Image: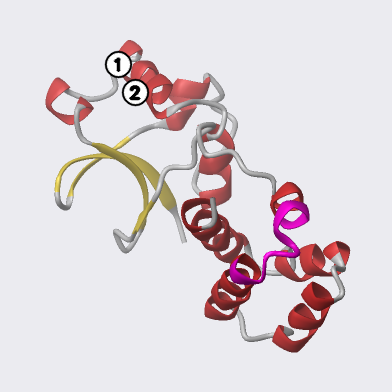
Amino acid sequence: MNYFLVLEKRPKDFMPINISILSKDDNYNYSSLQSIDEFTRRYTEEEIRDLIKENNIVTDDYLNGTLCVINENKYRYKLFTKDINMSMDTFLIKNIKNKQIMNKFVNIYIKYSNDNTALLKEAIKNEQLDVILQLLFSLDYEKIRGIYFYLFENCK
């Protein structure tokens, strides 16, 4: 599945952004969600918009649109910028004893994967951070990303 960084002027009116122009790296393929995130995490949303403007990639009417990532099916993903900064290690260390937050973590994990739920609950009970992280990072990137965004937005 291919992914695209886009500016959305109106619902379903997208203008794709050629990241290779912004990054000055024609040899890198920015067609995966992870590769786009690797690029966008280096900048704030405002800095990305400035890069787009400097490189004259889109018309002015798109510049005020919503910056997001879409896939071939036009499913929208939130933009991952350097403003969104949370370490999963730090998050778990800080919240491992907080039953409410860890219940949210388990629930969102189950939403993305029913595998190893009992093992995850046991690892949380025993405060085994290495096991929790191993289970989390055994998921595919899109699932990890979904869990990350949920925790970032709902467990501050």
Q: What residue is at 75 percent from the left and 78 percent from the top?
A: 120
Q: Does the CB distance between marks 2 and 1 fall below 8 Å?
A: yes
Front residue of 131/61: it is: 131
Which picture quadrant has residue 79?
A: top left
> Residue 130 at what x, y percent from top left?
87, 63
139 relative position to 52: left or right:
right
Which picture quadrant has residue 145?
A: bottom right
Q: What residue is at 35 percent from the left and 14 percent from the top?
A: 55
Cα–Cα gap, marks 2 and 1: 6 Å
Instruction: Report whether residue 73 is seen.
Output: yes
> Residue 135 at what x, y percent from top left?
76, 71
Residue ID for mark 2: 49
Residue ID for mark 1: 53
Instruction: Report whether residue 32 is seen.
Output: no
Depicted 13 relative to depicted 17: above or below: below
Image label count = 2
User: In front of the other: label 2 or label 1?
Assistant: 2
Front residue of 131/9: it is: 131
Q: Main secondary structure of the magenta part?
A: helix
Disc 2 crowd rating (10 Å Cα; few below 14, some 14-19, many 20+) is some
Q: Which residues are magenta?
A: 92-100
Front residue of 5/147: it is: 147
Check if residue 56 falls in the magenta segment.
Answer: no
